[in-house]
Every structure is written in C-alpha cells, then in structure tokens.
Amino acid sequence: MTRDKIVDQIRKKSDACIYEVIQIRRHLHQYPELSFEEVETGKYISEKLTSWGVEHSTGWAENGIVVLLGRKTSGPVVALRADIDALPILERNEVPYRSKNEGVMHACGHDVHTASLLGAIRILKDMETIIPGTIKCIFQPGEERLPGGASILIKEGVLENPAPKRILGQHVHPPLQVGKVGFKPGQYMASADEIYITINGKGGHGGLPHDCIDPIPIMAQVISALQQMASRASNPLTPTVLTIGKVNTVGGATNIIPNTVKMEGTFSTFDEKWRIEAHRKMKQLVEGICQSMGAVCVFEVRNGYPYLQNDPDYTAFCVDEAVRFLGADQVVELPMRTTAEDFAYYSHMLPACFYRLGTGNARKNITSPVHTDTFNIDEDALSVGMGLMAYLAVTSLDGI
C-alpha cells in the first residue's frame, strides 16, 4: 500500500473514532492517579483494550500494559510509549471532566498521551494485515517520580521478546498551536537529579543569636554559593540549571532560631561527565560552608533521569513522514529543553524520537503551561495525537 493510501486510511479511521477517544481522555482526566498508584487507570486501559478484542499483557511495573499488533512473531519491531500517571496538583479548571480525585491532576497531559495511544491502537487494529512487522505499544506508569517507570520496565524486559529497533513517544506542548507538531534531533531534554540538604545548627531565642548557630543565614549562603557554582563552574556551552524549590524549618516562630533547615531542589544538565563532577562540587561546597559556620550538613543527591537524545537519522525520517501526514506548515523544529523525561532511558537503549504535540489555542484561551492547575488542551489535538502516532508506527517499520 502506498504512503498516500495509508495516510488516507488513518485519517478516515481517526475521524471515525475521535469522539470515543475524546471520551477516553475525559474519563482519564477525571480519575487521575499518582505515580506507581495507577491501579484504576491500568484497569480502565485493560478493559478498553479487551472491549476492542486487543490482546495485552498486564502487571508491568505493577500497573503498566503492553500490546503487540501486526505480525507479532516475525519481521521488524517498533515501539510506541505513553505514560499514564498524574501529578499532585489541585485542579482549578471549571470543566465537566474536572478531576474527581482531589489534589491529583493530569497537569502534564499524560491523559492525552494515553488516549492518543489507545486511539492509535484502535486504528492499527483495523489495519493489522498491512503492518509489515510488529508494533509494541507500552503504557508506562511512574514517569513523574524517581526512579522512573521507564527504568523499571526496561529491567523487566519491555525492550525484549520482541526487541524493538526504534521507539516513539510524544508529549503535549501548550506553546505549540493545535494541529502542529515539533521535533528536535540530537540532545533534546536535560538530565534531572534531586538534591536534598539538611543543615543542623543550634536553635534558641531570636534575640540571642550569639548563643545559637543560626541555620537560616547559613542556608542563604548555601543557596547563593550553589547558584554561583552552577553558573561559574560549568562550561557556558553546556546548559546547566540548579533550582532550590523547597525550604522548610523544623519548628520555629518569629523570635525563634530553629535547630534545622531542610532544602530540596533539582540539578539539570546535558553532559554526563559534568553531571558527576557537579555532584562532587556541590557536596564539597555545602559541607564546607556549613563546617565553617559551625553547623552540620547532610547532603544527598538522588540520581534521576539521563538526558534525552533523539536519534538524528530516525528523527529526520519522522520529520519527513510528519510533513507527508500533516503538511510542511504544521511541522516545526524545537529548541533544547532543560526539563526532564524518563523516556530518556529508552533513548539511551535504541534509536528514539520524542516529539511534541501542539495542544494550545489562544482563541479558546487554552494557553496554560504543563504542571499548572489550569492546564488544559484543545481536544482537536487528539486527532493528530493518535493519527500521526499510528502513521509513524507503520512507516517506521520500513527499512529496519
């Protein structure tokens, strides 16, 4: 079958099931679950697949699901991945499908990713006879929390039996107008490590600081020194971001110097050698400041996701095919991002392409960024989300 005929078939099938996929997305949005707690989400995906007559395996990292389509036992293999977990955010959107699980929200669009992959499966199930190999569809839990569901699934063998030669993932992108998609070959997203610092001083009366070891000004020096390290010790050609996002004292009041201050933050970069060196420098710096001020420091770095790299050749292929499917004016090149994604684990195992799905629409006032309590999408994006993924899956099998 020619590419043009495949495009035509997928578009028609996408149009036929778009209403159902919108309802799937809305259901998922109403019932979000946190990382590694996606029990009902997994059950819902499984029930939907069963209703379509799609065989699947469950129990991947407890709540994940894997589907095989096409030949299943012969020919080349390509993988599609969608994450299924949500974030601990209280939703403020006034929409009929607002989250019913208070304090939990699909604020990063994983409901869109899951609905799009289910839609792609719905399309591809009807086209199995023309699939020149096997398409492995991965519904992955725990993207938002270390160690990342991707790392667990890889250890459990998700990239084996059958082993895909290429892998695709997509992510919502509010700054991109609905109908468009974006690609970035090579290094695309940063590594991300979590920093935990505890400064133990000596508390006492706020009016008698000479009798205390005040951890508050020590904390201020630590934060300032860490920022200076990130900006002055790193190669300016290597993007590096260090953020302290949380500071808490244990006890305290306006006139009480606390015993302890706790800080939490993140460290992101694109260079593995510098990443390891920076961990050492941060520990040495923080411990030195605390020691010089008479405090005791506990410094911990929890290694997170590696940087995400899009295979240049495979990404170029996907760009060409996206232009064929959507038109040249709908496909853009994206800059590097200093946010992180556990899809990065897959990208270090096999040729990968992680692209962005436009979901924003200023005319409808749909502009809120991801990870905010007013994030939403223009649901017209679901047609592109499932259609392009299905098309790239089929065409990616060529030439493997």
Image (spheres, rainbow, N blue to C red):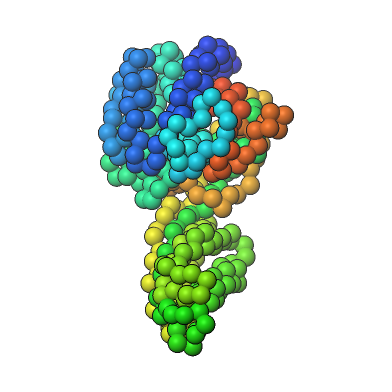
Which residue is found at the position 45% from the left and 53% from the top? 306
From the image, which quarter does the C terminus lie in? top left
Q: Position of residue 143 (x, y in %)?
A: 42, 43
Question: Is residue 285 among what the camera can see?
Answer: no
Q: Position of residue 280 (x, y in %)?
A: 43, 72
Q: Is 226 or 230 nearer to us in this picture?
A: 226
Does 309 sit above or below residue 223?
A: above
Quarter of the image for residue 129 reads top left
State left or right for residue 239 relative to residue 152. right
Question: Is residue 145 among what the camera can see?
Answer: yes
Q: Is 301 or 154 nearer to us in this picture?
A: 301
Q: Is 353 or 339 nearer to us in this picture?
A: 339
Which residue is found at the position 38% from the left and 42% from the top? 35
Which residue is found at the position 50% from the left and 84% from the top? 209
Quarter of the image for residue 36 reads top left
Q: Position of residue 38 (x, y in %)?
A: 35, 35
Does 260 sit above or below residue 359?
A: below
State left or right for residue 30 relative to residue 69. right
Quarter of the image for residue 262 reads bottom left
Does 71 sit above or below residue 180?
A: above
